[in-house]
Amino acid sequence: MNVTGIIVDGIVQITLEQEFETGSWNLNKTSSSYQLPMAESATVTEFRAKIGDRVIRAVVKEKSAARKEYNEATSNGQNAYLAEQTRADIFKISVGNLPSNQVVKVSLVYITTLESVGADTVKFVFPTDIAPRYEPRSENNTENTIEGLQSLINEGVQIQIDATSASSFVNISCATHEIEVSGELEGGNGKIKVVDSDPLRRDVVILLRTNVTYDPKLYIEKSNTYSNIAMMLSIVPNVTDLKLKSNSEFIFVVDRSASMQGLKMDQTRKALEQILATLPEGSLFNILVPASAIGSGTAIRIVQLPIF
């Protein structure tokens, strides 16, 4: 599998490209599937398949309608491809009636935001199990897994990232894997290649540190397909000289939706305890909880307590 990324400040576009030879498959199978885990915040922008010189690009449809169309196509003996979200961080790829003795290249493209680590650093995380994982056979799963695909994955995963920043790069580092960094870092351009012998042994975590100028930045992207223009404004406030007063008031907004239950809420509680312990004596703090999370008819719940 080839993984290529384009980072522009706090945004990254990832292309996952799997290439395999259908001559090694059992082509009596009508449909086969595998999964591509990705960041929960990711948005898929393109899904395509290339067989020889033919390129097939997907269109977005309602999930049940797309699944019905795929099933009808495979039942009629037609080549078919389907990408569907099965979980917030999982996309399932299904392929049907592939021709024999062909090189098939399936690509999925998505974009997501990068986590900020302070004012001058962003963190890029690539899940270790991003390579295809197969669903266990069950009564509700009549599809077969693709034989031989796992061995192809084990032959190597290539990960390369091109990074661009409006500010110069101070440092690009990776504590989890061995990487090679090249490019004009002072000009805000860097090329990153994971050269680790086993890139899938753990999450790939890359930190990109820039020279912060605290200047607003505006990014403009024009679509090559449509007459659309997207803009992103980035503002980094300079709080290095901020001095907290003893009579300051702090507001904390806590998400208590279903997705935050369990370990996430425990971590949130511990984080709040640590933050509150650092507030100046005599301060007031407010805890705001969305109404949907507490089953109340009011907009928010406010708890105001003093720090003694």
Image (tube, rainbow, N blue to C red):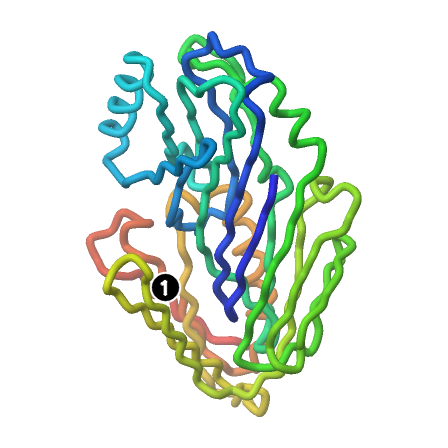
Question: What is the x, y in percent for residue 242?
Answer: 54, 89
At numbered mark 1, what does the secondary structure look like: helix, strand or loop? strand
79 over 11 or under it: above or below: above
Q: In this rendering, would 152 be left or right of 69? A: right
Residue at horizontal 42%, vertical 26%?
A: 94
108 over 80 or under it: above or below: below
Residue annotated with mark 1: 288
Q: Quadrant of the C terminus?
A: bottom right
Question: What is the x, y in percent for residue 284?
Answer: 45, 77
Foreground of the two, 169 or 120: 169
249 over 175 or under it: above or below: below
Number of residues whose C-alpha sits closer than 10 Å to that of mark 1, classed few (under 14), some (14–19) or many (20 or more): some
Residue at horizontal 44%, vertical 31%?
A: 92
Foreground of the two, 238 or 252: 238
Q: In this rendering, would 128 be left or right of 288? A: right
Question: What is the x, y in percent for residue 195?
Answer: 76, 51
Foreground of the two, 96 or 287: 96
